[in-house]
Image (cartoon, rainbow, N blue to C red):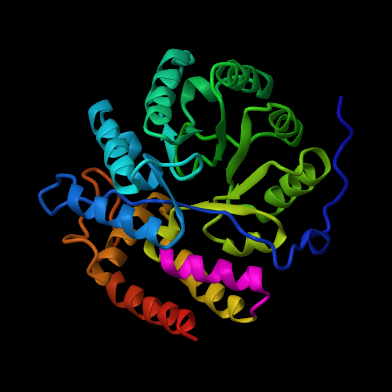
Amino acid sequence: MAAPLRPVDPLALLRPRRRIEGISAVLLPFSASGTIDWEGFEAHLARTAAAGIVPAVNMDTGHVHALGDAERRRVLGLARGALGAPRPGDLVAGACVVDAPGDRFDEAGYLGACEAILAAGGIPVIFPSHGLNAGSDADVMARLARLAARLPAFIGFELATAFVPSGRILSAAAYRDLLGIPGCIGAKHSSLSRRLEWERLALRDAVRPDFRVYTGNDLAIDMVRYGSDWLLGLSTAAPEAFARRDAWWAAGDARFDELDDALQALGDFAFRAPVPAYKHSMAQVLRLRGWIASDAPCPGSPRRPDSDREILAAILARIDAAAAA
């Protein structure tokens, strides 16, 4: 049995002037009639890549659970087209299996999804499912190891049930085991808990320093100060501002703090309960920017009130002012 973790001192984790790796989960927008806005999606993919941010598609922000196989493959095709011929690391995509509580682990379904991602030039993110996350931590790790044996590389994904019912946050011991899977090059951590993420960073630093801890904590995007990289849905609202913030951190520029604070204000507002409604908040922001034609949410998804637009506009003005400082 692994020794218990010592209490983590966050100050000891601080990594000033570090180059941050950012991956943005790109919103899949919808028209007022409930159809996918493919043109708006393609333009936002190109906008994200042009900002120097790696796009992630078929993620929660991309409504992956609401899509069929043909739509997911079209998303991948558009992503590949928007990026030209992606080099390794230029594109990330969710490998998603939609199942129900009690279903068995669909290894073939995951491998098929990963094969499509690899063919598009992307790196798969192993999305949670009921079958994958059922049972003990040892059961989950054994399933991930089976996938790893068939894949050149992948990104793991801890996701709280506040986002999806099939989510799971690993124990510290299981996370140590995850670090021992060579093909797992990193993992997105979306518990919305600083403490749990600090534990993971301390483990990573001690066990496997090249492993990427991608924060998915949209309520604490400054986790990058401590050595996290990021894979966020919030960033789809402002890819250029996130890129500038990260460049300022690498340069030791004090303007990082005020821009980070402004972006965090958007995260705090957009990711309030019910958390899944953040996707509608992101659509409202992109519509306010003039980047998409409609801020309608995906059919069946939770909505935010129209009155949010006025508050979002004020936050965007704050972000723009901080980014232009």
Residue extending farthest left = 33
Q: Is residue 103 magenta?
A: no
- Can residue 148 be seen by looking at this rendering? yes
Q: Position of residue 163 (x, y in %)?
A: 46, 44
Task: Say which of 54 and 13 sits in front.
Answer: 54
As drawn, is 324 to the left or to the right of 299? right
As drawn, is 99 to the left or to the right of 141? left
Count of all numbered marks drawn on residues in the image: 0
- Dominant secondary-structure state across the stretch colored magenta: helix
- Can residue 307 be seen by looking at this rendering? no
Q: Position of residue 34 (x, y in %)?
A: 14, 46
Instruction: Tell me what residue is drawn at x 60 percent, y 40 percent.
Output: 187
Instruction: Tell me what residue is drawn at x 89 percent, y 33 percent.
Output: 3
Instruction: Tell me what residue is drawn at x 85 percent, y 51 percent.
Output: 7
**Placement of 279 over or under 112, stated as above or below:** below
**Placement of 215 over or under 95, stated as above or below:** below
Q: Position of residue 141 (x, y in %)?
A: 65, 22
Task: Say which of 57 and 302 sits in front.
Answer: 57
**Placement of 275 over or under 313, stated as above or below:** above
Q: Which quadrant would residue 261 be assigned to in this image?
A: bottom right
As drawn, is 21 to the left or to the right of 204? left
Task: Say which of 256 and 215 sits in front.
Answer: 256
Q: Is residue 246 magenta?
A: yes
Q: Which quadrant would residue 101 be assigned to in this image?
A: top left
Start-end of magenta stretch: 239-253
On-image quarter of the N terminus = top right
**Placement of 185 over or under 227, stated as above or below:** above
Q: Position of residue 63 (x, y in %)?
A: 32, 42
